Amino acid sequence: MPTKTFHPPLSEVAQAIQPFRVMKILGEAKALEASGRKIIHMEIGEPDFPSLDCAHQAAFEAMQQGLTHYTPTLGLPALRHKLAEFYRRFYDAQVESGRFMITPGSSSALQLVLTAILNPGDKVLMSDPAYPCNRQFVKLLHADLVSVAVDHHSNYQLTLAKLKDHWQDGIKLVMVASPANPTGTVIEQHELLAIAHFLAEKNAYLLVDEIYQGLVYDRPAESILANKTLPDNVIVINSFSKFFGMTGWRLGWCVAPLPLMPVLDRLGQNLFLAAPTPAQYAALRVLEDDALEQLEQRRQVFERRRNVLFHAMQQAGFNLKVLPQGAFYLYWDVSAWTDDSETFAADLLQQTGVALTPGTDFGEHKARQHLRLAYTTDEKQLQIAVDKITQYIKHLPVKSPA
Ligand SMILES: Cc1ncc(COP(=O)(O)O)c(C=O)c1O
């Protein structure tokens, strides 16, 4: 009997979700590597360092002691207290531990928060370019996106003036990240505070993604929570992924206004029950002083890499419009050579073995004329990468002006 082919019916929303294009480049880079090519990985957004030994030890000891069960959905009370203390010590921010929720990566925190506040048809405003998944979370909840194009004139960040210019009825949430992905730029605290107050008047929330907090250069790390006159419409998300170098442990947190906490708890109980328990014990350990000192050393390595890469790119005559203040990314305008950053990135990888991410992951505004470079490889490799890119570009025809 002929077998009938099953075509699984899919939800409309699942079909509308866009892939993460960096994964495609990563897949191609891995395939080339498997065939024996040497690849310089500057595509993926995670620190190249392994997580700290003390984190491994703490997780292992917890497991040996049988601490492998669910924690409360909001997280281990000790970790929520430790984070509150961390904000008091390093950011002079007085935030009670009851406002912290520990989540499986900040990705879960983002989904929880958006689920807690958005109805279908509500509007969410964010910059373009911005972290790709946020646009997809908005779609998942049948909410609508309001994109605001940003460029070097505003340090690739939203400003109060831009927000006012693009304001529409129905905006319930504005999302910013500082430092940002893909540009590495920072939004100044006075601007953020002004935005928070403007949104409070409009009865809308401000979500500040501080996931690259701690990875800042030539300036102190900051949190909007340090602000003494902060209105209570502000939600912060953060993570152990980047500064703490623990991407694979899947651990993040959010700090929300108290009235939201029972709602986040109820959603978390249903969506993931609790964040991974061994990871929470490891997190307690990396918040100790000796671990923070080691992480500071790594921050300094990233700072040196930023300087090396930025100056090498400048020397090569490439168009970098701002010196990023944080994270581990440079956003590079390649409009002199292409209007198709995806093909450019694919060809660059094939020809030179340098893997970069096309701007199309991060939005639509000039996305086909930009590439993101991640300095998640050592200084020598960064220099080699710039040499290879320079050679590659020498053989490209310069585009005639449109
Ligand atoms: C700006 C930003 N927010 C959130 C995330 C999510 O990270 P995680 O779920 O590992 O905490 C990322 C990851 O790259 C990011 O760049």
Image: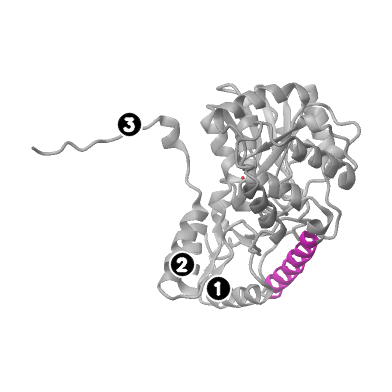
Q: Which range of residues does the magenta coloring cover?
A: 294-315
* Coloring applied to the structure: one colour
Is residue 306 inside the magenta stretch?
yes
Left or right? Give the position of 110 relative to 32: right
Q: Determine the CA span between mark 2 and mark 1.
A: 11 Å
Is 145 drawn above or below residue 279 in the view shown? above
Q: Determine the CA span between mark 3 and mark 1.
A: 45 Å
* Residue 191 picture location, percent across and down: 83, 40
The residue that mark 3 highlights is 9
The residue that mark 1 highlights is 393
| Label of residue 347 in the image | 2
CB within 8 Å, label 2 to label 1: no
Identity, as a three-letter code, of the amino acid under mark 2: Asp
Badge 1: few (under 14), some or many (20 or more) residues near its Cα, within 10 Å?
Answer: few
Q: Of the residues tagged 3 and 2, which is closer to the observer?
A: 3
**318, 47: nearer the viewer:** 47
